[in-house]
Amino acid sequence: MARQPESDSFLDMFSRFGRDLKLPKVDVQAILDHHRKNLEALEKSARASAAGASSVLSRQHEMVEEALGEITRMAQNYQAPGNPSELMTKQVEFARKSFETTLKNAGEVADLVRKSGTESVEILRDRIKDAMAEIRAGYDRN
């Protein structure tokens, strides 16, 4: 009884099993290439998301610094007026500026997040389209 070499790889055993069952040939390299492209698209999407998150954090940091600078300037220029009407006017103006700045900053951050998310999704969407075309082409050959 002849001994088979013990160095059979899993792929060799799988190929032999498929041959014995008369299964159609499997293009292992095509399958590996397909999954490699999937992983590359996921990596590219993750990089785009990370870059977007980094730009959002950076911009938020700038916004906080700007707000603290504005508060500091207002505190330095603050002089208690003798007239309650003037005090109320200054407080209303400060509240109005704060509210407008907050709305502007929130809109800007939302735009950054939306842009980052759209870019990440587009990368994955393009890969899905390509993968579907590859699958269709594989069926058309058979």
Image (tube, rainbow, N blue to C red):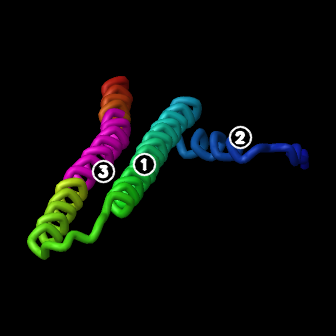
Q: Nearer the viewer, residue 48 or 56?
A: 56
Q: Which mark is residue 92?
A: none
Q: Quadrant of residue 92?
A: bottom left
Q: Is residue 124 magenta?
A: yes
Could you classify mark 2 by the number of other residues whose Cα lies within 10 Å: few (under 14), some (14-19), or many (20 or more)? few
Q: Tag 1's secondary structure?
A: helix
- Kind of residue sitting beneath label 2: Asp
Residue on which disc 2 sits: 12
Q: Is residue 76 magenta?
A: no
Cα–Cα span, label 2 and label 1: 59 Å
Residue on which disc 1 sits: 62
Q: Magenta segment range?
A: 103-126
Tell me the residue at 44%/40% (across/down): 48
Q: Tag 2's secondary structure?
A: helix
Tell me the residue at 37%/42% (across/down): 120
Q: Nearer the viewer, residue 136 or 5?
A: 136
Residue on which disc 3 sits: 109
Cα–Cα span, label 2 and label 3: 54 Å
Q: Residue furthest left?
A: 85
- Kind of residue sitting beneath label 1: Glu
Where the C terminus falls, by quadrant? Answer: top left
Q: Is 60 left, or right, of 103 in this rendering?
A: right
Vertical order, 67 against 29 (above or below): below
Residue 43: give x, y in percent of width and height.
51, 41
* Mark earlier in primary sequence (2, 3): 2
Could you classify mark 1 by the number of other residues whose Cα lies within 10 Å: few (under 14), some (14-19), or many (20 or more)? few
Residue 109: give x, y in percent of width and height.
30, 50
- Kind of residue sitting beneath label 3: Val
